[in-house]
Amino acid sequence: MVFSSLLFLFSFLPLFLLIYFAAPKKGKNLVLLVFSLIFYAWGEPIYVFLMLFNSLVDYFAGLTIEKYWEKRLVKKAALLVSLLVNLSMLGFFKYFDFFLGSLNNWFGMDLELLGIALPIGISFYTFQTMSYTIDRYRGRIQSQKNLITFGAYVASFPQLIAGPIVTYAEVDKEMESRRIDFTGFCDGVERFTEGLGKKVLLANNLGIIWKEARETPVSELSWFLAWLGILAFAFQIYFDFSGYSDMAIGLGRMMGFHFPENFNYPYMAKSATEFWRRWHITLGRWFREYVYIPFGGNRKGRLRTIRNLLIVWFLTGLWHGAGWNFILWGLFFGILIILEKEFLGKRLERLPAFLAHAYLILAVLISWVFFEIPDIGEAFSYLKAMFGWGGKGAADRLAFYLLLQNGLLFVLAGIFSTPIVRKLKERLPEPVRYVFYTAVLLLSTAYLVDATFNPFLYFRF
């Protein structure tokens, strides 16, 4: 079953918060664990046991590493068991059918696909639990001896499904003791409401525009509609994913946690390198900390650095989905970043800011075509239409209709993807802010009641 509506979250939250705040300090992790399992089981009643199994493996791996700290072979074996179990589960459920399908296509085979449903959030919680055992092996953290506390960390429902990816080191102290106060709760409510508004009021409506462009046959796709559609998707995926991250950070703040930021206005970047310092920050940090640096980073010469970057970006693409389009998307960014490190970056720095920014936006819009269109041939056909080859011409009635109907939506999307609103919010009197957040909450709720399908895009990954 897929999380098809945010309405469940709205019905789930009040009871959770009531019991959570009423529980004694030592009981809050138990409440968080129980409700998180209920939340996950509502969407994945069977796969909750998979998450529990992974959690138990990593919990005991951490204890084993601590107990046999002086015995290098034993603690390394514990780490390898943890990594093997986590990567095997992720590989089987997410990539096995992709592997079989690739064999069928390459060698004309007829292997039957298993048709296994992807456990929601497996890419996120697998990376979290692996970071725990790796950091424990490195001696950066102490083993968590309380199984309930460790389970609450892994299953914590605010960021369980689509991040941000929270390493144990970031919440170690708060898992044991966290401060819950009225100011923090109010800050959390504001942040949650911001994320809800991004998702429901902006992302969902922008998705309708992209759907119109996507469903138009490429031969009927005008230059203008192609650009309008991919621009709508660029805004949609940003507000959808950053909206979820805001909701997760806000919910965590209500409970006394300080989850890491996951977005920092990425469309304000002026290079691909800077874009990935601002987009899905926790994923980029994870690959840098647990893949790029262990492989040698940039410490072993130019060729090794290029190799390490290609490995990271191959894996980044593959992490996002079991498809060659995702791998191509990841390598596209990897090659851009390598070029920027080699020579392009210095030239971008000398350009006027608006030209460097235009370069980044063009690169990102092209990348989203590969990201969102699974068939690579179709993706290239869409790109050809964007650049005036093989489409229907410069513009058509549908493109003008969508622009006229959604012009204000695009303007708002552009404004809210910059720091302007944040700076304005900081200067607003509190009563005005309360009115604004109340309006966003009411409008979002009204949209949710009227709609029946509100999945987050990153639930697929």
Image (tube, grey):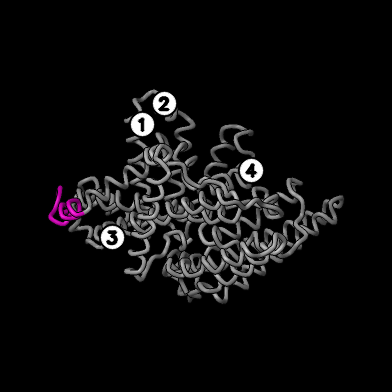
Contact check, label 1 and label 4, Cβ < 8 Å: no
Residue denoted by label 4: 295
Residue 188 x/y as whole percent: 51, 52
Q: Position of residue 143 (x, y in %)?
A: 76, 55
Q: Are marks 3 and 1 in contact (CB under 8 Å)?
A: no
Residue found at the very far right of the displayed protein: 70
The nearer-to-camera label among 4 and 2 is 2
Residue under the point 42% across and 30% down: 344
Q: Amino acid at mark 2?
A: Glu
Q: Nearer the viewer, residue 264 or 178?
A: 178
The tag on residue 208 is 3
Around disc 4, counting alpha carbons within 10 Å, would you say few (fewer than 14), some (14 to 19), or many (20 or more)?
Answer: some
Asked which secondary structure carries label 1, the reply is helix
Residue 356's disc number: 1
Q: Upstream in the sequence, badge 3 or badge 4?
A: 3
Q: Residue at x 66, y 43 (%)?
A: 294
